[in-house]
Image (cartoon, coloured by chain):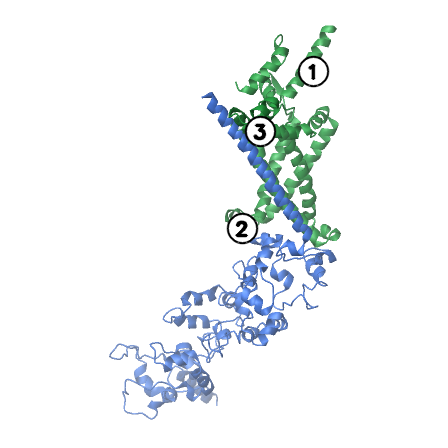
Chain colours: A green, B blue
Amino acid sequence: MSSEEKSLNNNMSVLSKEKPIIRDDEIIMRMNLAERIQHFVLIITFLVLIVTGLPLIFSEIKFLKWIFSPQKSFYIRGILHRIAAVALILNMIWHTLYTVFTSRGRNNFKEMIPKFKDIKDAFKIFWHHAGFTRFLYRRGIFKKFFETHPYWLFKEPPKYGRYNFIEKFEYWAVGWGSVVMIISGFFMWKVELSLSIFPLWVHDIFIIVHGYEAILAFLAIIIWHMYNVHLNPESFPMSKIWLNGKITGKELRILHPLEYEKILENRMKADQSNQRE
Amino acid sequence: MKKILTLVVFFMLACIPIFSEADEDCMICHEDPDLKTEEGKLLFIEYAKFLSSVHGESGISCVDCHSDLQGFEDFPHAEKLETVSCGECHDKAAEEFKTSIHSEATIKKDSLTVSCKDCHGKHDIRNKDDFDSRVFPLNLPQTCELCHLGKVKRERGVEFIKQYEKSIHFEGLEKAGLTTSSNCSNCHGAHDIKAVHHPLSRVSRKNIIGTCGTCHVGIERNYLEGVHGKDYAKGSQDMPVCTDCHSEHDITSPQDLTSSVYTTKIAGVCSRCHDDETLSRQYGFLTSRLKTYSGSFHGTASKFGEARVANCASCHGFHGIRPSSDPKSSIHPDNLPETCGTCHPGAGKNFAKGKVHVISEKTSNKWAYLVKIIYIILISVIVSAFLIFIAADIFHRVILRRKKE
């Protein structure tokens, strides 16, 4: 058991001694079917867009030229890119409607709103992982300062809610990125329309934006999302939540302690009101 | 009367396979298929073939050409006769031939000698318009190739000659049966054929425009009106001539995938000069044309083999290319909507508001440059942050594992 788990157990022990309201092996739905389909459509459309789009930026690479060597393949590439783009837009519209019109969607959105705590969390988790101040403390450097200000030792990792700062960053990056890509891509698709509104130099900016935003999105997904969700040693080779949507009580307690507490609180309230009745 | 007429006709018919009076003496010996010299050289002459030749038809006899045997009686004659001098009658052709590369070879007494008979044949020479003539347009390539694919060694090798068979000109001869399609002599000349480097050669840089223009009249006129043609007419040796872009023996249609001016390859051809620093300084044009074209969607798509996007010629034209300063130029700002409109229907004036060949956004499009810089900074900062956070996470996990052990 890691130090985090121990500390969490201590926190929880007061609440859960008498009655373990959330069992460790209890299955909690983290992603429901609609959310999983939205995520899955996003994966497919994103992949298709990347595969059919990035080669244009890195056209010097011979391997990419080889992929598109058969006749008409470049034309098909364009068609696939547009189909995927339309699918991505439809998926986005669905997600927006889902967020607005379902209570679960609205709740997810509330949880997703960035707060100042997220910046603090990012700061805390970094120094907690780096352990630099604890190293100084052990060496007796700035001992007095650390004894009076134990915060700076970052002994405990921050407690995350339903969505931690990593997930929030990704969600809003995808949202923002999609909007940028859709607008710039739309005008690239409809060149004649674009140039009937904008001068050529503005259209050129659309092209630049579309390219760089694509690179940013690609890097964010393969580095940040892949490591944090799937490739880190804890969940390697991948987390299965995107497939079955399930998270266990134990995982929730460790990864999303604030949400765990929230659920616990709600259940206890319900329990108490039941008893009163 | 009727009897006499039939007799005459009969006599005439009977005469045809028989030798004319003058040749009778010769054919006594030379009609023998086994007649050979001591070295085994066949001396047999197919008289029927001679009779159907242009010379036979016009009643020229053996000794008219083999003139050293005129009036000779004491047969058999000497083994070695004087070389037949075609120039006695064909004086104009002989004069021309004297200036040709083939004639030089003869004079130099090289191992390779070319004379009239090598191209035209000997006793069976036919008129050049005769379908069976060796120099009939449809047959000429084979005749030239007899030597030029074999014993003749030129710098560019046999392959270079063979390339002709891939050309649209050869296709015209072979498939379409067009006698007007270019064969060897249409470009290189016939009797007066010169080495390529010879200033009078029809295929020299100086003369090639006129040579191709013999058939491609309209193109020659367009070319001479364009920026390349104008400087060419002034005598500049740097100007691209037909063969620089279209290649030489293996000229194919621009629609042909193998053509050097096929839509996806043309940028490579133009940039041979237009990316050349020395030429750009000399003639005052901008370089980096290929690089900047490649950077655009047109260029990128073209690199991937997409044939529908604009290539150099789509915007600039081809034979009669004019500089953008020329009001008649397809890329003159006033004409851009029309030029771009060929592919982008309804293209308006906005197409002219911006740079097409963008060397650097820094100078041509400040806002684009700013956006680019912001993105580069953004990407580097964000990706660095990702990597630092991941490094810290991995570091923490390693430390924890060590503590456990």
What whole-number distance in Å separates the C-alpha atoms at marks 3 and 2?
Answer: 41 Å
* Residue B110 to residue B245: above or below: below
Residue holding disc 1: A266
The quadrant in which residue A183 appears is top right
Query: Which is more toward the observer, B13 or A14?
Result: A14
Kindly identify the amino acid type of the residue bearing the numbered disc 1: Asn
The residue sitting at 64% across, 54% down in the picture is B362
Contact check, label 2 and label 1, Cβ < 8 Å: no
Label ID, residue A60: 2
Q: Could you tell me residue B185's position as x and y percent?
A: 48, 75
Is residue A47 among what the camera can see? no
Mark nearest the camera among 3 and 2 is 3
* Mark 3 crowdedness (10 Å alpha carbons): few <14, some 14-19, many ≥20: many
Kindly identify the amino acid type of the residue bearing the numbered disc 2: Glu
Residue holding disc 3: A127
- For label 1, the SS is helix
For the C terminus of chain A, the image quarter is top right
